[in-house]
Amino acid sequence: MEQKTKLHAEDGKQELTITREFDLPVDLLFKAYSEAELVEQWMGTKVLKLESKKHGSYQFETSQEGNVVFRANGVIHEFIINQKITRTFEMENTTFPVQLEYLEFEKLTETTSKLTMQLVFKSTEFRNQLLKMPFAQGINWAHNRLQEIISSLT
């Protein structure tokens, strides 16, 4: 099955660009990233904190059989409704250092929109390490769930 979420990693660069077009109005796509209840649904994770504002912070956690298997947190540096979120992202209890994420939300038509995510890593080695994991499949799965769940709200 074709992956609708596209990843672009240029050799020798510390960046990863992720793009996806959604059959959703831009305001709903933005809400999917900024409202805790929606994030929990499509990411399949518990939102411990989500302050969707400039200088806000967030923390997500995923547990299996009572054990925490994933925890991430960050600080929101820029928050422009229906346009962009700039934030840090840290996976706790891993060797990955904090990364910087630029999320841009673009209206294509009244019912379609595009998300462009630029992730900046401390080094090309950390970016490449992430790409060796099932990251591409995971984000495509999550975006498919986002499309499905948020579509049901319209």
Image (tube, rainbow, N blue to C red):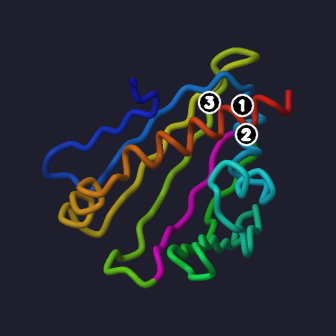
For the point 57% across and 29% down, which residue is it? 114
The amino acid type found where label 2 is placed reads: Asn
SS state under label 3: strand
Residue numbers of the magenta segment:
83-92
Determine the secondary structure under disc 1: helix
Q: Nearer the viewer, residue 131 or 88?
A: 131
Q: Which mark is residue 82?
A: 2
Residue at point 71%, 68% (across, down): 47
The earlier-in-sequence mark between 3 and 1 is 1
Q: Give the position of the C terminus as an image quadrant.
A: top right
Callout 2 touching callout 1 (CB < 8 Å): yes
Q: Which residue is mark 3?
A: 106
Residue sitting farthest toward the right: 154
| Residue 26's disc number | 1
Query: Which amino acid type is marked by label 3?
Result: Glu
Counting from the top left corner in percent of width and height, residue 62 is at 60, 70
Q: Compare residues 21 and 47 and report the one nearer the observer.
A: 47
The image position of residue 97, as x and y in percent, is: 36, 77
Q: Which residue extends farthest front?
A: 65
- Separation of marks 2 and 1 at Cα, in angstroms: 6 Å
